[in-house]
Image: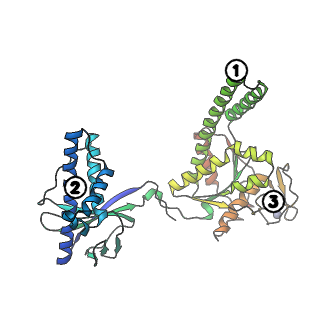
């Protein structure tokens, strides 16, 4: 998988050697596109002097269709219609640039200048053969193509010297956003919680900031007051505005917090394993489902996904039936009678005693790796670097975090 969010286009230009019959057809394209440009530039100027406004791209398109039906201009049909369209679009862009004072007024194109036409779609490049619409045989280049991105657009040109070129616009993979490989040592599992916002599989726990907790209390109070105001009363309207204001404030504070946490995580780790939230909410009770939405888990996971995409990092979502909470992260024993109130997981089979959320996050990481058929690193010591780095970055953002003492134990 590759993602190119920071799109970067580069044009690669190669000398082309058309055959004599291809030269004829190329000339028809140059001529038709030049005609379209000049025709509509003249029409625009005429309309502008008469009506005080120019011609729109849509109007040009309609007019072009009429022209092509007119016998006198029937030769326009010999050229690829998308190349003609592209000429109109270029002209429209030139007008827009001019009116925004970014460029000069478009000029008429002359026969003795360099000629060109664009092939925006339906082309195909195979080795050094370039297939474009209206051409039965491919056009040839004799240079090795030295790019690796995806081709988006072609422009074919003839210089006044008589040399032909093709310029290929390529969407380049940004070096910084090359997708990172999934490896156990750079993968982190995340357990989302109510008391602790997240517990990472290396033992780092991130707390929800106190200022958000204070605002949440304020909101509960404001909502309670609202419910006491008489329906339709002026005071109720006033209180409703107050509630909305507190809600807006909380959502800003939350987004800021979630942004920072997701930023740190996607910076430090190459692969992040999370649980599918849709499921988690449904499996548990109604009260908890509400806490899930209040805690901002949905926002958090979508931020994680967006940031991972941007940085070339991986997100693995594990499925609904993976027993992340009930399974012992050391021996795999499933404890069916684990209660929600038990904050420590104690395994009756191997004797492991571990923080419940840490146990879950280690399992989440493991399920994620297994789902890709990759080896897990169970039994190894958690690399200390991974959490010291996380803590350092979180501290810089002013976010409280701690490390569970079980972390770094050879068991994990
Ligand atoms: Zn066990």
- As measured in the structure, the alpha-carbon distance from the residue carrying label 1 to the one carrying label 2 is 64 Å
Q: Are marks 1 and 3 in contact (CB under 8 Å)?
A: no
State left or right for residue 38 relative to residue 246: left
| Viewer-closest of 374 and 280 | 280
Category of crowding for the residue at label 2, using alpha-carbon neighbours closer than 10 angstroms: few (below 14), some (14–19), many (at least 20): many
Give me the residue at 22% from left, 71% from top.
16
The residue tagged 3 is 326
Distance CA(mark 2)–CA(mark 3): 70 Å
Task: Mark 1 and ligand 1: say if the CB distance to the nearest ligand atom is below 8 Å.
Answer: no
In the rendered view, would you say 171 is above or below 246?
below
Front in this rendered view, residue 5 or 22: 22
* Mark 2 element type: helix
In the rendered view, how is the structure colored? rainbow
Disc number for residue 37: 2
Locate ligand 1 by image quadrant. Answer: bottom right
Q: Is residue 160 left or right of residue 153?
A: left
Residue at left offset 70%, top offset 42%:
294
**Residue 103 appears in the figure:** yes
Give the class, few, some or many, for how many residues have Cα within 10 Å of label 1's Cα (few <14, many ≥20): few
Name the front one of labels 2 and 3.
2
Q: Residues within 10 Å of mark 3 (few under 14, many from 20)?
A: many
**What residue is drawn where x is 17% and y is 73%?**
24
Q: Please give the name of the residue rendered at 59% of the width and 55% of the height, measured from the top-left corner.
A: 269
Task: Give residue 234's mark.
Answer: 1
Question: Do the CB atoms of the residues marked 2 and 3 lie less than 8 Å apart?
Answer: no
Q: Quadrant of the C terminus?
A: bottom right
Whole-angstrom CA distance, mark 1 to mark 3, is 52 Å
Point out the tag, 1 or 2, that comes first from the N-terminus: 2
């Amino acid at each position: 998988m590759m993602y190119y969010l920071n799109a970067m286009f580069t044009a690669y230009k190669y000398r082309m050697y058309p055959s004599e019959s291809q030269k004829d057809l190329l000339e028809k394209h140059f001529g038709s596109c030049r005609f379209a440009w000049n025709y509509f530039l003249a029409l625009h100027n005429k309309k502008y002097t008469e009506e005080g406004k120019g011609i729109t791209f849509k109007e040009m398109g309609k007019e072009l269709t009429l022209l092509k039906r007119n016998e006198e201009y029937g030769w326009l049909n010999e050229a690829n219609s998308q190349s003609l369209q592209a000429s109109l679009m270029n002209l429209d862009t030139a007008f827009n640039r001019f009116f925004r004072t970014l460029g000069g007024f478009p000029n008429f194109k002359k026969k003795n200048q360099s000629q060109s036409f664009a092939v925006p779609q339906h082309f195909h490049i195979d080795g050094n053969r370039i297939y474009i619409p209206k051409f039965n045989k491919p056009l040839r280049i004799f240079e090795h193509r030295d790019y690796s991105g995806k081709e988006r657009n072609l422009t074919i040109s003839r210089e006044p010297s008589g040399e032909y070129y093709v310029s290929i616009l390529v969407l380049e993979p940004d070096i910084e956003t090359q997708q990172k490989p999934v490896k156990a040592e750079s993968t982190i599992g995340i357990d989302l919680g109510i008391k602790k916002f997240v517990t990472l599989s290396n033992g780092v726990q991130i707390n929800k900031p106190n200022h958000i907790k204070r605002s949440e209390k304020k909101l509960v109070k404001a909502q309670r007051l609202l419910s006491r105001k008489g329906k339709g009363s002026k005071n109720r309207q006033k209180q409703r505005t107050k509630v909305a204001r507190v809600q807006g404030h909380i959502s800003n504070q939350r987004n800021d917090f979630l942004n920072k946490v997701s930023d740190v995580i996607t910076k430090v780790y190459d692969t992040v394993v999370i649980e599918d939230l849709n499921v988690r909410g449904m499996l548990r009770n109604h009260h908890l489902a509400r806490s899930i939405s209040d805690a901002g888990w949905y926002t958090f996971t979508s931020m994680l996904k967006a940031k991972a995409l941007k940085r070339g990092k991986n997100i693995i979502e594990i499925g609904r039936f993976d027993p992340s909470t009930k399974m012992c992260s050391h021996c795999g024993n499933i404890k069916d009678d684990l209660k929600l109130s038990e904050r420590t997981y104690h395994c009756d089979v191997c004797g492991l005693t571990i923080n419940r959320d840490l146990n879950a996050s280690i399992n989440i990481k493991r399920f994620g790796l297994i789902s890709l058929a990759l080896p897990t690193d169970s039994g190894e010591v958690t690399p200390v670097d991974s959490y010291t780095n996380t803590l350092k970055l979180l501290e810089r953002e002013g976010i409280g975090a701690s490390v569970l003492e079980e972390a770094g134990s050879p068991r994990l």
